[in-house]
Image (spheres, grey):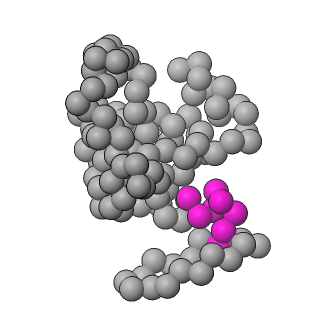
Amino acid sequence: EDQLEKLRRQNFWTLCVQPHHRMADAGFIRARLGEKRIANEAYRLASLLRAEVPFALSSDAPIDNYSPLKVIEACLEDSRSDEKLTFEEALWHYTTGSRLRLGLNPGLIEENATVFLTPYR
């Protein structure tokens, strides 16, 4: 909790979070963190939102799965109901929110659209 508060107060950094790591790391993370730390300290997406910590979502490709669907699913599928994001929250932070945090025009989401990276003004 103290780290969330420090991140909220700093008002400078944007966290770049890769939610699919919770799923990709499942095979070894218990041995490294233990059940208590996993339950209370790890992979806290909704906690970032509640604490008003600025964050963007990403895939961490090519290290982890690059599928946008897998990133969104990872935000929605957490055994801790208080750490799940809604579909709308996940989609916004993965698309529009991430672009805004990078200083880019939020653009439009369209099927088969070409996105041009222009500075947000």
- For the point 49% across and 64% down, the residue is 95
Q: In which image quadrant can residue 52 be found?
A: top right
Question: Where is 14 relative to 110, above or below?
Answer: above
- For the point 42% across and 33% down, the residue is 44
The image position of residue 67, as x and y in percent, is 33, 61
Question: Where is 91 relative to 119, above or below?
Answer: above
**30, 4: nearer the viewer:** 30
* 77 sits to left or right of 120: left
- For the point 73% across and 33% down, the residue is 10
User: Is any atom of residue 87 visible in this view?
Assistant: no
User: Which residues make up the magenta segment?
Assistant: 97-105
**50, 74: nearer the viewer:** 74
**86, 77: nearer the viewer:** 77
Question: Where is 27 relative to 90, above or below?
Answer: above
Q: Quadrant of the C terminus?
A: bottom right
The image position of residue 15, as x and y in percent, is 58, 43
Q: Is residue 100 magenta?
A: yes
- For the point 25% across and 32% down, the residue is 26
Question: Where is 119 relative to 82, above or below?
Answer: below
User: Is any atom of residue 97 visible in this view?
Assistant: yes
The image position of residue 92, as x and y in percent, is 47, 60
* 40 sits to left or right of 121: left
**39, 118: nearer the viewer:** 118
* 28 sits to left or right of 101: left
Q: Is residue 108 magenta?
A: no
The image position of residue 2, as x and y in percent, is 59, 19
